[in-house]
Image (spheres, grey):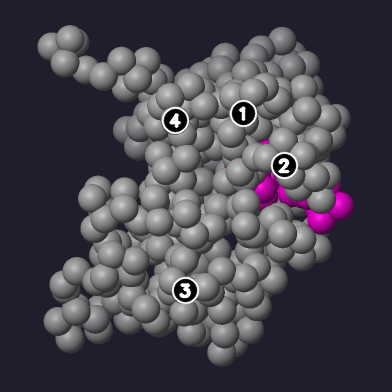
Amino acid sequence: MRKFVNDRAASLQPSGIRKFFDIVQKMDGAISLGVGEPDFVTPWDIREAAISSIRLGYTQYTGNRGLPELRELVSRYLKERFDVEYPPERTIITVGASEAIDLALRAVCGEGDEVLVPEPSYVSYAPAVTLAGGTPIALRCTADNDFVLTPEIIERAITPKTKALILPYPNNPTGAIMKRSQLEGVAEAAEKHDLLIISDEIYAELTYDGKHESIASIGNMRERTVYIGGFSKAFAMTGWRVGFVSAPAEIDEAMFKIHQYTILCAPQMGQRAAVCALKEGFEDGFSTVEDMKNEYARRGRFLANSFNSMGLSCFLPKGAFYIFASVENTGLDGEEFANRLLAEKKVAVVPGSAFGEAGRYFVRCSYATSMAQLSEAVDRISEFLKELGRR
């Protein structure tokens, strides 16, 4: 049956994250630092809003763009929290940020168009570019610069075919963020080379080092930026699959048509839960989000300090909820380290190579789990390193 399979789909490699997640689910006593999912339960009021919507019979399709009330709230949220202005009529409620990424790339990519993808970065970007008919071009970011993208890295990759740049900060897997002065350099390069920016800001609320800055708030960058956000990380709503995308008019129109034909609309119950999340956020100053962020920051400090003391070099994460630790001094690459750690100590981490070749000698560890689990994982990793003769 291979002849029926699209060559682009056939060429894709399975997700390096899911491989370890699937193994852990079947392993008694295993600790997973693999999948980036909050261990917090969605706040009760948000769950209650969805339950009430079902009881009241709100089980139909919504308009393709999503509930008008939710789009109004998203527009207000972006303005008040991040100084980013997109009107509700240029916002689409999507099935998670993942659909938004796919929509943006399918709306933009022509055959052979090059899309710049910083590495290390989220596993879906390059495959999504390929499936959209484009060519992903890796931009190698390095640990000595805390994995921050620079204009110089962009300049080295520009060709006549370059069309867009994915900007994934706060970053998964590294925990890196970009300050406004750094974003201004990227904005300058984008204007110079007439690039579209696809800015994935799903971790915007989980910024520990100052206030999150969006490239869409700089000068005229809103008109060359596709802004992607959602509710999964900051509101502990991963399974609800509610995201959003805002964009310049022409790109919004193209994305909207694709969304109409492929998805129709995000589930109404999830949209009503998202309405509740934003309404309550405005009422209490997003205190629940702040509480979760502060707890993640505490866990991140613990894990970074523990790893550095064991000789697994990493910087203190500045955003998201991941540590990207170098294992090079163990004599193993990230793949070997992760496989052996899981087999010998039942701790799952993700090989850095899952996020691009730049991560070959790294592993990603999510600290979106309890302190008790993190402490036990650190003890097991310490034992593993001793047995390797590295402690």
Q: Are marks 3 and 2 in contact (CB under 8 Å)?
A: no
Q: Which residue is mark 1?
A: 162
- Say whether residue 53 is magenta: no
Q: CA distance from mark 4 to mark 1?
A: 11 Å
Whole-percent x, y for residue 324 in the image? 68, 35
Residue 264 falls in image quadrant: bottom left
Residue at disc 2, secondary structure: helix
Q: In which quadrant will I find the N terminus?
A: top left
The kind of residue tagged 3 is Pro
Whichever of callouts 4 and 1 sits on the residue coming sooner in the sequence is 4
Q: According to the image, label 4 marks what residue? A: 110
Q: On the image, which quarter does residue 315 sit in?
A: top right
Horizontally, residue 41 falls left or right of residue 268, namely right
Q: Is residue 277 left or right of residue 296?
A: left
To which residue does mark 3 refer? Answer: 88
Given contact means CB atoms under 8 Å apart, are the residues at marks 3 and 1 in contact?
Answer: no
| Range of residues picked out in magenta | 168-183
First in sequence: mark 1 or mark 2?
Answer: 1
Give how far across and how far down residue 94 sits, in percent: 37, 58
Q: Secondary structure at mark 3?
A: helix
Q: Nearer the viewer, residue 364 or 138?
A: 138
Q: Quadrant of the C terminus?
A: top right
